[in-house]
Image (cartoon, rainbow, N blue to C red):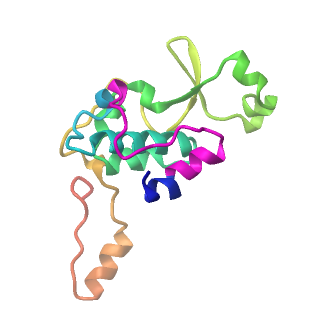
């Protein structure tokens, strides 16, 4: 038992009736190893499980993109499925009100390989060139607002724009 896990992730799992608690030494999941191959060390499996938990618990809440960037795991964006959310099937549609998938309140839906998905990142490209990431890609950082650069200069320090956004 780990008190920190019990106060955080395991509390979430208990809330939804999932009676399998996360431990400090979880079993290695080959799918997570493939998803995060750069995570190494004695806590690698725990870190991977925490990342999986964030992906599940915070689904459709707008955190995933920033998490992937913070974890330096942008290679995940090269897989188009990273951009796609839940697959929309007749069974899924039956679970929700019709206006969720149709009409003016419809989510951003996208067709991919003949199937319909809820698009996770509506402003992001599904084309292959737009999904490629390099080690010095400017998308690793957000641009610093010009107003903040100007403000820093007026206070005697010079804040420089992030690489690629000059």
Q: Is residue 106 above or below residue 31?
A: below
Q: Is residue 20 visible?
A: yes
Locate residue 81, reporting x and y percent. 44, 25
Front residue of 70/18: it is 18
| Pick the front one: 29 or 102 | 29
Which x, y percent locates residue 140? 28, 49
Image quarter of residue 145: bottom left
Query: For the point 61% across and 46% down, which residue is it?
Result: 14
State which region is magenta. Answer: 9-32
Does residue 129 appear in the picture of this structure? Answer: no
> In this view, which residue lies farthest toward the top?
114
* Left or right of 103, for residue 13: left
Q: From the top left corner, tell me how far across and down residue 124 is, in percent.
A: 44, 37
In this view, the residue in front, 64 or 34, is 34
Does the segment drawn in magenta span residue 38?
no
Instruction: State which quadrant residue 65 falls in.
Output: top left
As for residue 31 lying within the magenta part, the answer is yes
Q: What count of labels does the image hold?
A: 0
Residue 17: x and y, percent? 65, 40
Quadrant where the image shows the C terminus: bottom left
Q: Residue furthest bottom?
A: 155
Nearer to us in this view, 14 or 72: 14
Please state if 117 lies on the left or on the right of 27 as rendered. Answer: right
Q: Residue at x 42, y 32 (%)?
A: 125
Residue furthest to the front in view is: 1
Using the image, determine if residue 145 lies above or below residue 42.
below
Asked if residue 128 lies left or right of residue 159, the reply is right
Residue drawn at (44%, 59%), measured in percent from left and top? Answer: 4
Seen at 53% across and 49% down, the residue is 10
């Amino acid at each position: 038992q780990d008190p920190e896990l019990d106060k955080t992730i395991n509390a979430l799992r208990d809330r939804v009736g999932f009676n399998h608690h996360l431990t400090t030494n979880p079993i290695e999941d080959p799918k997570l190893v493939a998803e995060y191959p750069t995570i190494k060390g004695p806590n690698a499996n725990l870190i991977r499980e925490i990342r999986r938990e964030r992906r599940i618990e915070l689904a459709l809440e707008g955190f995933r993109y920033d998490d992937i960037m913070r974890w330096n795991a942008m290679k995940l964006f090269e897989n188009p499925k990273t951009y796609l959310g839940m697959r929309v099937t007749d069974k899924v549609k039956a679970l929700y009100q019709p206006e969720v998938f149709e009409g003016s309140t419809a989510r951003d839906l996208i067709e991919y390989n003949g199937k319909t998905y809820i698009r996770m990142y509506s402003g992001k490209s599904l084309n292959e060139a737009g999904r490629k990431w390099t080690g010095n890609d400017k998308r690793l950082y957000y641009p610093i607002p010009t107003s903040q650069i100007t403000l820093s200069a007026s206070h005697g320090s010079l804040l420089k724009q992030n690489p690629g956004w000059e």
